[in-house]
């Protein structure tokens, strides 16, 4: 059974690193590898130590043949002990680094020296437990040896306690259910690894170094080295290991799947956007020239018919319609061109309320009879580092999409909510509608360029692609969730500016 856990850890470490390579997955990879190293060292140590009950032996090795093979595996006690030390002291380090990485507490994120300081205790322990150094400084000095053991044990417990607190505090502080669900998924996997670590971290490398001696008197034997375990105790230990492995692996699979789909979606959108940019630019150039020619023709028609005895009012009415339609098409073509070409945004300090007001002004100018439930939960009027024109256009597009979703819905009383609030390091612009909603397949495609489930004569499917691009240009992100027939919610996250 124990060997299965080791295989699980190796698979887990490879999975998280292959799917997405960033600081977060590196910490997860390092945690898995550290735990695997410690458990491997313990597995070999127990086999060589012997004196355990048959039940525990079966739990660790399945059968006597595997245990015998590991028992006679050629490795020095120095190497074996330091293998345990590496895993034992690196796991809490990377656990705390990951907790700090996730934490949105302002004091933690501003003090960059904090990450350097937390390296000090693990490095000291790894240096003190290096076999030659350990034997030299602890020879005939039981007090100093016990001090090293308790020092390492103490900072490990502190690191794990602080990490768990930061994870739980972050989960509690996340207001948006969309992000809380994702965060709970990953910390479930992290807590499963941590619980597995806590079941075996009591194994001190000094015990391995003193395999044939009793230089340090261990007060209580480690549970898995006791020759006799009660049936309830043994059952509890086995079940706890199994639960940790199953819950952790299930959470990891779900998390890895989400990471893979997110990465795949980004790659698809990037590839498609590059492919359409050139074709769209050529198309726009040609169409624009034709429409500009039409504009000249309209003017010539007006001059010709001005001297004829025709119904000038009716003719003027038609030409005005044609001219207005021509201008409208030109504006749509220009909008399409701006969406697919590389935009240069100019980020300057701007009031968030000013951006919101401008977006609402655009919206009410187009839909004068539509009402929006506006809720602004801000203690003051915050300042953003933003391009007011592009950002207000992006918010306006979100509101227009919400209106279209309600228009397509069978519900008689559709609602649109615009909620503006702050969450830790971000200002959030949340747009919610009670419209038709989307299926999972539609949600995977809505940000792709030229994708639309609406009438293609009126909608070219560039709105959400444009909004996501603008969010990225503002060092923010666009998130969304939806259920078919129940509506959708879009979150535009923008970093705070100070």
Image (tube, rainbow, N blue to C red):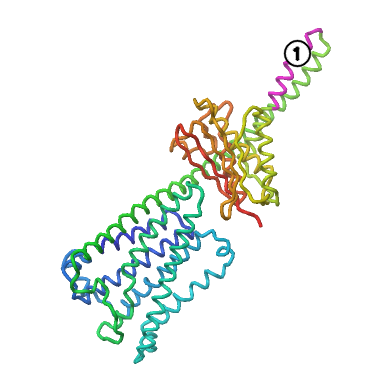
Q: Quadrant of the C terminus?
A: bottom right
Magenta region, residue range: 309-327
Q: Is residue 212 left or right of residue 158?
A: left
Front-most of residues 38 and 274 = 38
Q: Position of residue 220 (x, y in %)?
A: 28, 78
Front-most of residues 70 and 417 = 417
In this rendering, the answer to whether 151 lies above or below 33 is: below
In this rendering, the answer to whether 13 lies above or below 481 is: below
**The magenta stretch spans residue 318:** yes
Q: Residue furthest right?
A: 307
Badge count: 1
In this rendering, the answer to whether 87 lies above or below 310 is: below
Tell me which secondary structure the magenta stretch mostly adopts: helix
Q: Position of residue 110 (x, y in %)?
A: 59, 64
- Does dot 1 land on a helix, a strand or a loop? helix
Q: Is residue 301 left or right of residue 5?
A: right
Q: Residue at x 67, y 47 (%)?
A: 352
In this rendering, the answer to whether 305 lies above or below 425 is: above
The residue labelled by disc 1 is 315
Q: How dense is the environment of label 1, judged by Cα within 10 Å: few (below 14), some, or many (20 and up)?
A: some
Q: Is residue 288 left or right of residue 55?
A: right
Q: Residue furthest bottom?
A: 140
Q: Residue at x 39, y 85 (%)?
A: 133
Q: Residue at x 39, y 82 (%)?
A: 148
Q: Residue at x 78, y 19 (%)?
A: 300
Q: Quadrant of the N terminus?
A: bottom left
Q: Position of residue 312 (x, y in %)?
A: 79, 11
Q: Is residue 419 left or right of residue 19?
A: right
**The magenta stretch spans residue 69:** no
Q: Position of residue 285 (x, y in %)?
A: 66, 33
């Amino acid at each position: 059974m124990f060997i299965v856990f080791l295989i699980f850890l190796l698979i887990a470490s490879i999975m998280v690193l292959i799917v997405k390579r960033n600081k977060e997955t590196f910490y997860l990879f390092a945690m898995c590898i550290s735990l695997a190293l410690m458990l491997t060292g313990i597995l070999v140590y127990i086999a060589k130590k012997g004196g355990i009950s048959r039940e525990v032996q079966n739990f660790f090795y399945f059968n006597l043949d595997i245990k015998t093979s590991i028992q006679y595996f050629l490795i020095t006690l120095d190497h074996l002990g330091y293998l345990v030390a590496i895993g034992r002291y690196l796991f809490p380090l990377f656990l705390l680094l990951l907790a700090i990485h996730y934490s949105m507490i302002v004091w933690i994120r501003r003090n960059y020296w904090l990450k350097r300081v937390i390296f000090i205790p693990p490095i000291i322990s790894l240096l003190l437990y290096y076999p030659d150094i350990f034997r030299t400084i602890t020879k005939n000095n039981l007090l100093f040896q016990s001090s090293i053991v308790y020092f390492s044990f103490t900072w490990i417990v502190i690191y794990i306690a602080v990490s768990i607190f930061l994870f739980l505090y972050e989960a509690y502080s996340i207001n948006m259910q969309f992000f809380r669900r994702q965060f709970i998924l990953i910390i479930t996997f992290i807590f499963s690894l941590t619980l597995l670590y806590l079941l075996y971290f009591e194994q001190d490398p000094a015990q391995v170094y003193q395999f044939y001696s009793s230089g340090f008197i261990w007060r209580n034997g480690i549970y898995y080295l006791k020759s006799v375990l009660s049936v309830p105790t043994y059952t509890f230990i086995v079940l706890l290991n199994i639960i940790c492995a199953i819950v952790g692996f299930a959470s990891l699979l779900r998390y890895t799947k989400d990471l893979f789909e997110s990465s795949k979606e980004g790659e698809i959108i990037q590839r498609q956007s590059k492919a359409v940019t050139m074709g769209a630019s050529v198309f726009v150039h040609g169409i624009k020239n034709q429409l500009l020619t039409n504009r000249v023709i309209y003017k010539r028609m007006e001059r010709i018919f001005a001297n004829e005895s025709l119904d000038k009012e009716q003719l003027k009415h038609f030409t005005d319609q044609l001219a207005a339609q021509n201008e409208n098409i030109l504006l749509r073509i220009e909008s399409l061109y701006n969406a697919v070409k590389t935009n240069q945004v100019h980020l300057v300090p701007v009031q968030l309320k000013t951006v919101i007001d401008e977006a609402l002004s655009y919206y009410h100018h187009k839909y004068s009879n539509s009402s929006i439930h506006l809720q602004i939960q801000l203690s003051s009027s915050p300042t953003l580092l933003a391009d007011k024109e592009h950002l207000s256009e992006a918010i306006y597009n979100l509101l227009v999409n919400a209106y279209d979703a309600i228009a397509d819905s069978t519900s008689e009383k559709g609602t649109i909510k615009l909620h503006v609030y702050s969450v830790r390091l971000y200002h959030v612009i949340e747009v919610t509608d009670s419209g038709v909603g989307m299926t999972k397949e539609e949600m995977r495609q809505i940000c792709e360029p030229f994708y639309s489930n609406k009438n293609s004569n009126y909608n070219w499917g560039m709105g959400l692609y444009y909004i996501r691009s603008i969010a990225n240009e503002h060092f923010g992100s666009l998130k969304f969730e939806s259920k078919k027939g129940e509506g959708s919610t879009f979150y535009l996250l923008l970093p705070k500016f100070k």
